Structure formats: structure tokens, C-alpha cells
Image: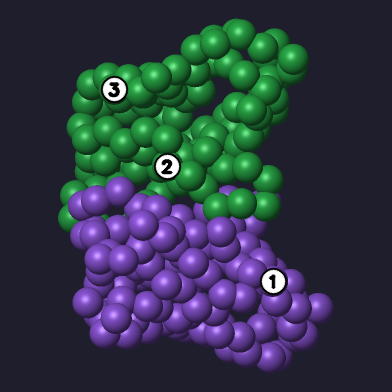
Amino acid sequence: KAGVTQTPRYLIKTRGQQVTLSCSPISGHRSVSWYQQTPGQGLQFLFEYFSETQRNKGNFPGRFSGRQFSNSRSEMNVSTLELGDSALYLCASSSSSRDTQYFGPGTRLTVL
Amino acid sequence: QKEVEQDPGPLSVPEGAIVSLNCTYSNSAFQYFMWYRQYSRKGPELLMYTYSSGNKEDGRFTAQVDKSSKYISLFIRDSQPSDSATYLCAMSALNTGKLIFGQGTTLQVKP
């Protein structure tokens, strides 16, 4: 079974731009969660989607948004990028909220 | 105070040593406890998953959960250089896909 895939793997943007990251979950998984990883703050939860509905949201500003499609693929968008948004963005999928989460390789975003 | 506390290390041990990694937490609602391993520039890889209190063993790895003390541990027996990585504890409450992570402990196993 193929694992979680994320595209692109690397991105360089400048302040003020917006960015869209994509995540394809493991086949059959309906829950997708997004996390931000930085050296200072570690891994922090952004949001969770299940069957196209956002079920949980972390403590991030409204510039961070996401969505999930009917095939369970998910995208997250960050608008008006700031230098502090530079991070590894990780997507994880699970069959339900109670099940274990499997992570993708991440998208490394650099904001200049 | 963070919900999950984990000593960031770094921890350096000789090959073959027994490694003990620990996390403490403050939220009594946590029911699911996990350990992930993360190699440099890779995504976290699930090592162990435990529901509620108790022990779980998988090969060289043993996970322990003590909910009364709000303390979880991961033991690695016969450590190998390939175990050199960052180990992250994670936990969640019932019916939520929100994982709360510790800061991660960097482990180096020297040949």
C-alpha cells in the first residue's frame, strides 16, 4: 500500500505571497491532519479533516486554511506569508480519529 | 507549561546500550499514546501505539504508560547506530485526530 504523499517537497516563497500544499492520504484513509514543525516550537497541530469536514483546529491564525476533497485528498493554504511561516509542513492520514496517524515526508517551506 | 514535556537531549549512548526515553503530560484526557521516530529531513515514522495504561513490546522496543503518574516511556534494547534519530512522544484524547507532541529527544548511538 502506498504511503502518504505530499507535494511539492520543497518550496521557496517571498513574504506576502500565498502557497498551497497538497496531501494524498493512504488509500482508504478518510482522516487527514496537518502539522507544522519548527525547531523552536516542535510539531504543532494545524487542523484535521474527515469526510470533507474540518473537525478540529489548532491555534493558528486565519491565514492558515485547508480543505478536503471527496477522494480524501487534502490541501492547505497559507496566505500573506510571513518569515515565521518557514517550516516543515506535515500531513498525516488515518482511517478514523481514533486510529494511528501515518505521516508523509513533509513539504519544506522557506519564506524569504 | 506545555501539555507534554520531553527532554530534548541530546542523548549519546554506545552501541548495545539500553535506552530510556520519557515524557510527562498534564492533560488527564489523553487516552492514546504514541512514539514516533524521525530521521533528519524525513517525516515521523510510527514506532509504538498504546491505548490507556500498560506495557507493549515490539522487538527491541517496549512502551510503557502510567496514567496515574502521567508518565510514558520508550525503552530500546540492544541499541544500534541505525537507531540514531529524534524520538517524539505524542498523545491524544478520545475521538480526536489532534496529536500533541513532545519536543523530541535526539538520540545518537555510537558504534
Mark 3–mark 1 Cα distance, whole angstroms, equals: 37 Å
- Mark 1 — residue? A10
- Looking at the picture, which amino acid does disc 3 mark? Lys
- Mark 3 — residue? B56
Mark 2–mark 1 Cα distance, whole angstroms, equals: 23 Å
Q: Secondary structure at mark 1?
A: strand
Q: Secondary structure at mark 2?
A: strand
Residue that appears at 58% across and 16% down = B79
Chain B drawn colour: green
Q: Chain of mark 2?
A: B
- Mark 2 — residue? B46
* Chain colored purple: A
Quarter occupied by residue B18: top right
Residue that appears at 64% across and 28% down = B82
Q: Chain of mark 1?
A: A
- Looking at the picture, which amino acid does disc 1 mark? Tyr
Which x, y percent locates residue A68?
34, 81
Using the image, determine if residue B86 lies above or below residue A66: above
